[in-house]
Image: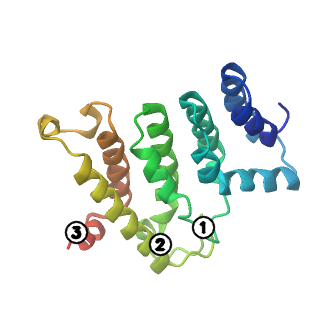
Amino acid sequence: MNSIKECFAIILNSNEKDSRLAARQVRKLLYTAQGRDERKDTNKIINTAPQNYAQIKDDWRQENFVLAISVIYFTHDKEEQPDFLFPWLFQLLIHQNGVIRYAAVRMLENEIWPLTAHIRFPGHPGGYYGELKPALADSIIYSLLLKLNELSADLYRPAYKKYKYVDSLPASPYKSVQMVLAQLEELSSSNYVDSFNR
């Protein structure tokens, strides 16, 4: 397993033990020197992740695949379409497997930080997404808030009312959605989120 591309081939095609080892190897390989071809392979893996994931039948293979994607996810090409994987991440966020849900939470939280940079640092030039205009970032944030609130309403159960903090909620898709919402609200000003709720 000398390349990320090779690791993903093993994750998708090999036995359970080798698939698990390959998923863990991705993290080690990410921080080694990558050439131009390796970066192209990584971007291609990320860009085709939803399609490849849809073809996976084994639960353990789905888990290994999502874990490996969550390691390399932040390297995707953000300028062209920063929210292109959000529909897939929303599916993962309500998955019954907690490992998959938590990986989706981490990936969404990684996206929230740069999307809200213009709110936290008004007038600051540049940013993580390069030339992403604040209006486009606002549009993405509003869409994200809308979808997360829809999921939250669908997943809510009266038993959750007794929990005061998100951390104390039982592990569930509802808690995962609430974790992302809490991160989004924390990184945005309260006035910003209130303007969306109006």
The amino acid beneath tag 3 is Asn
The amino acid beneath tag 1 is Tyr
- For label 2, the residue is 137
- For label 3, the residue is 197
- For label 1, the residue is 129
Which-is-in-front pick, marks 3 and 1? 3
From the image, which quarter does the C terminus lie in?
bottom left
Q: Secondary structure at mark 1?
A: loop
- In the picture, residue 129 is in which quadrant? bottom right
Compared with 5, 144 (above or below) is: below
Give the distance between the C-alpha atoms of the residues marked 1 and 2, in whole angstroms. 10 Å
Callout 2 environment at 10 Å: few (<14), some (14 to 19), or many (20+)? many
Callout 1 environment at 10 Å: few (<14), some (14 to 19), or many (20+)? some
Q: Residue furthest top?
A: 17
Please report the residue visible at 22 percent of the width from the left and 69 percent of the height from the top: 197
Whichever of labels 1 and 2 marks the residue nearer the N terminus, that label is: 1
Whichever of labels 3 and 1 marks the residue nearer the N terminus, that label is: 1
Looking at the image, what colour scheme do you see? Answer: rainbow
